Amino acid sequence: MRKTRRLAAIIRTRGAQLLLVLALAVATGAVTVAQARPAAAATCSGSGCNGKDPASYCSATSTPREWFIDQDTTLQLRYSSKCHAFWGRAFQSCGKHLPPLHIRVERQIYTPYGYARERVYYEVAGVPCNGDPGWTRMVGNYDSDRQRSCVGHSWDGRPASQMPEDWWSWCTDEHGGWVY
């Protein structure tokens, strides 16, 4: 009985001392409370990137293949090795008065009859006339397929998805070849 009382007294004393030390440590900043970290940037890969906005997923890791169409327009086919996906991006300075410029990216699959379009994505926002970029959503990288980016002017103000094929005046594929 005597041992039990003595043990209880020690626990009360040591417990009080431990609480005091802990309170002092928190008050002086010696102990910090773990804070939640912000979530890492969203990522995707290959076909999981289809239709996603690269600005939210992969833009920081992209490599551009860039072509200067004329003094006012630049077309890029961008690739992210982190996301295994492509997208198109274009700039225009609008030195001339031109109709709205649109951009698209497409994934083409190889068939016995040549390449055929499998997916097409248009710009997330139009290509502004102040040198800021316009860009498309992404298409996944598949080893046997090819991707290309195209720009064209909407001569009567139609949205990109309704423009006739012959209005897409400049296109390129991932291998750097121009297709008119």
Image: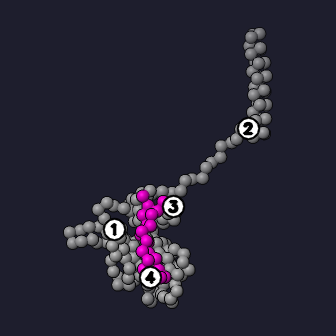
Q: Are marks 1 and 3 in contact (CB under 8 Å)?
A: no
Quarter of the image containing the N terminus?
top right
Mark 4 and mark 1 lie on one chain; the one further toward the N terminus is 4
At x 42%, y 64%, the residue is 79
> Which of label 2 and label 4 is nearer to you?
4
Q: Earlier in the sequence, mark 1 or mark 2?
A: 2
Q: Amino acid at mark 3?
A: Ala
Can residue 24 be seen in this snapshot? Answer: yes
State the CA–CA distance, disc 1 to disc 3. Answer: 22 Å
Q: Report which residue position mark 3 lands on.
A: 60
**Which kind of residue does numbered mark 1 sit on?**
His
Is residue 102 magenta-colored? no
In the image, is residue 169 above or below residue 141? Answer: below
Magenta span includes 68: yes
Is residue 122 something that shows in the picture? no
Q: Which residue type carries mark 2? A: Ala
Q: Which residues are magenta?
A: 60-81
Residue type, numbered disc 4: Asp
Q: Nearer the viewer, residue 146 or 27?
A: 146
Q: Nearer the viewer, residue 61 or 113?
A: 61
| Residue 108 shown left or right of residue 2 in the figure | left
Q: Position of residue 68 (x, y in %)?
A: 44, 77
Q: What kind of secondary structure does the magenta stretch mostly adopt?
A: strand
